[in-house]
Structures are given as C-alpha cells and as structure tokens.
Image: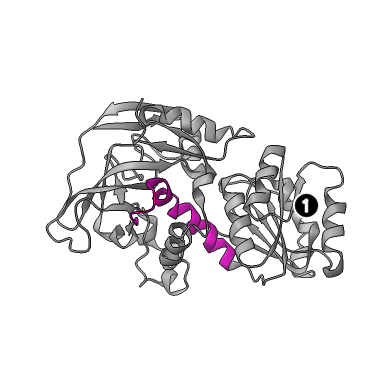
Amino acid sequence: MQAVVFRGKNDLRVETVPVPSIKSGEVLVKVAVCGVCPTDIKKIHYGTLPPPRIFGHETSGTIVRIGAKVTAFSVGQRVGLHHHVPCLACHACEHRAFAQCPTYKKTGITAGFEPAGGGYAEYVRVMDFVLPGVVPIPKKNTMLEGAMLEPVNTVLKAVKLLKIVSGDIVLVAGAGPIGLLFAKLLALRGVFVISSDLFEQRLKIAGNWGANWTLKADAPNFADRIHQITKPRGGLDAAIIAVPSDEALKQAQSLVRGGGEILLFAHTKRGAMTELDLSTICVDEKQLLGSYSSDFRLQKEVARLVFSRTLDVRNLVTHQFPLDETAQAIDLAAHPQPESLKIVVNQELHH
C-alpha cells in the first residue's frame, strides 16, 4: 500500500509499505479521510520523535477485515477512529485525568513502524485496546464528519473544564478551526463569545460560528473594547487561548475578572517559558487551566453533536489533498492563510 512515511525533520516520503496484518482482537480499516492536526505538524517540523513513523490520527474509513475474536464490528462498516483510549482503572483514570493514563498514552492505531496513528496511509491496523474508540458513522453522514470526532472531542473536553454558565462572556483567542469549534460549542451553551484573530477573513467567519463580537488581536483598542463589553461584570468570565501566543495569555490574564479562568489549549511545546504576575492567580483568584487531548467519556455526546449537525463541521474543511500530497497539506496547515481553516487528506479524491 501507499503511505506517507516520516523519515526525519521535515522529511515526508510517499513509500510502498506492507498492508498491516491484524491479530484476532483487531480490525483493519481502509482509510478515507485524515485531518491534519497541529500536534502532528509539530512532530514533523521539530522531529520530536525518532523516524520512521506514519502519522495522522484524525481518521475515518471503512472496516475491511476483522479478527476472529471481534464481535462488535463488521466488514463494510464506516467508522471514525480514536488512537488513544484510557484503561479506566488506573490512578490517573480514577482522577479523570485520562490523557495522563499510561494505556491512553500508548498509540493503538498504526500503518507500520512504531505506532503513530497511521492515517496518512491507505490502511490502518486498529488494536484491541482502542476498539472502544471506534465510532460507527451513520449512513447520512460523511467520512469528513467521522474524521472530525476526535478534534471536536478535545474542544468539548476543554469547554467542560470551565466553570462558565449561560450568559457569561468568554474570549476565544484564535479563530482557526479549533477556535471556531470553541466559539460554536460555547454558543450552544448560551455563552456570549468574543473571537479574536490576526486575520480579518477569519473574524468574518467567526460570526457564523457563534461569535457575538469579533476583534482584531492586534487592534490598539483591544483592551478598551473588552472593557466596554464586560463593564458591568468587571472583566471576562473566561478566556480560551487557542493559539500558542504568550502575548494572548498575558493580555487575557489582565482582562479576565477576579475569580475568572484562563484556559491554555495550544501551548504544547515543551520547555516554553513565560513571565506572569503570579498575584493575579493567588490574590485575584484568576485560575490558569490547561487541557490536552480527548475525553473517552464524551464520545457519545460528540457523535450526537456532529452527526445531528447541531455542530456542522463540514464548513470547517476548506482544503482537501490526496494522499500523495500530504506534505503540501501539512505545509499549508503549518502556515495558515486567511482563507484556510481545517485541512484534510482525503483518499476518496481522485486526481
């Protein structure tokens, strides 16, 4: 089969590799769509993991082979996949810190080499311990929607961490695909949303995704506008930092009301340091939170949101590339343009 193999920093090659063989408790999926995620971009650009690997984890496809012991699925089923599933029994899981569970940290989907998701290949082997993360796609829904379950889950998990209630005002810094998902999921909860971004074009789109106000992130009157909007309550109830910008974090720290919350969603680079006035956390009780990866318990809720199109993710996808152009897809996602939002590798496309 064809696969896009990571061979070193910024080195992706289309190669012919064997179709993975499966064990009795596993399934083989023919990949249809795989989304491009910033965590994969980081691994490819910085070479944080040793090659060779086949990345891609926001995956949907069709089951083409099932192991003898698999009873919950059948050949021909269209499914969305999750490459991490927690054990639900360890100390981390007891504390609902699923992303810290040792089993969760193991990658259960592979197209060969060290398991790394495998979505940038024609077929993936889905191991037994992640079968609970396989979600059937209803007939009326698309493979694109199936591939969006995992990213939507990560955003919903983060939203549920916040102590916000209907009528609160929340700033979402960044109006890329993740920022827009945040805006919509907050709006569905009755929260008023302020979206900020450096791209005007994205701010225009944010209005359709639930943003009540849009502000250019570098506007000289940015803080004044926030003060005007939030005046009676003394500041933002929460701010979500969906861009890896320290400036956005510091700005949010000053604009959130006492007792409010700041949630980091995009600061994933190890060793990144910044200065903060710690008295804002201690004296003003502005809580600083982080959220990473998905929450297994939210799978059904996410499937309902996406497949009912209460959260219609189809408009989020602006660019689709065939498998042999995966490197271009990743390059575009790494250098977002005003008109580019979610980028996917779609093997159902024909040249």
Position of residue 67 in the picture relative to residue 84 (left or right): left
Answer yes or no: is residue 334 visible: yes
In the rendered image, the quadrant that contains the N terminus is top left
Residue at image x 64%, y 34%?
A: 338
Q: Quadrant of the C terminus?
A: top left
- In x, y percent, where is residue 174? 66, 47
Question: Which residue of the protein is positioned furthest toward the front in this rendering?
Answer: 140
As drawn, the residue found furthest toward the left would be 68
Callout 1, which amino acid? Gln
Percent from the top left, x then y, of residue 25? 18, 58
**244 and 201: which one is in front?**
201
Between 275 and 155, the residue placed more toward the observer is 155
Instruction: List x then y, in percent, for residue 270.
Output: 55, 47
Report the residue at 78% width, 52% height from top: 251
Q: Quadrant of residue 335?
A: top right
**Residue beneath disc 1:** 251
Q: Is residue 231 above or below residue 107?
A: below
Q: Which residues are magenta?
A: 137-160
Residue 265 lies in magenta, yes or no? no
